[in-house]
Image (cartoon, helix red, strand yellow):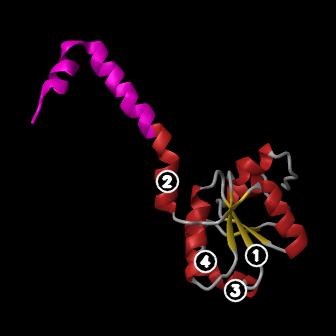
Amino acid sequence: MDLSFFVFLQKSPWHMMLFGTAVVTGGMLLWPLVSRLIVGSTPQVGAIEAVQLINRRDALVLDVRDKADFAAGHIPNARNIPLPELSARLREIEKFKSRPIVINCQSGPRSATVCGLLTKNGFGEVFSLRGGMSGWVEASLPVEK
């Protein structure tokens, strides 16, 4: 095994710093790819696509944030079932199995988990809102309190 690379790194603190910077930036560039592989192939929709699903196909918006966040502001006509309570309260949304469901959380990651859970329980069209509530607000769409 050739150790010349490690010898080179040890010659100067600048070499270590530049190598560390290269590793960190490379990791940052690869993170979106890795996170997509971890989350799986959860279908996502943007805020405008979600509005189209709501208006054209009567999609249900399921907000999985806690009750305080929901009360502070939510998508109009959204139904709130906090993530920790979802498994116990699935019966409440069983009648919506044939309709598209848009899952909303604060920024997006929790909704991907919920999409997987709903799909395993027989819900057909389940979408994660890209960017969550933050994406909705950034798109300047209406918020109810």
- The residue that mark 1 highlights is 100
Q: Is residue 115 left or right of residue 71?
A: left
Q: Secondary structure at mark 1?
A: loop
Q: Amino acid at mark 2?
A: Ser
Q: Residue at x 39, y 28 (%)?
A: 22
Magenta segment, which residues? 1-27
Q: Which residue is mark 2?
A: 35
Residue at which label 3 appears: 94
Pick the quarter of the image with the C terminus.
Answer: bottom right
Where residue 19 sits: x, y (%)? 32, 25
Which of 25 and 108 lies nearest the eye of the viewer? 25
Label whose residue precedes the other's in the sequence (3 or 1): 3
**x%, y% of residue 106?**
66, 52
Q: Mark 3 or mark 1: which is in front?
A: 1
Name the residue at the front extreme: 2
Mark 1 / mark 4, whichever is N-terminal: 1
Three-letter amino acid code of the residue under disc 1:
Pro
Q: Residue at x 58, y 84 (%)?
A: 121
How would you classify the magenta stretch by its main secondary structure?
Answer: helix
At label 3, the amino acid type is Glu
Q: Amino acid at mark 4?
A: Leu
Viewer-nearest residue: 72 or 34: 34
Residue 63 numbered tag: none
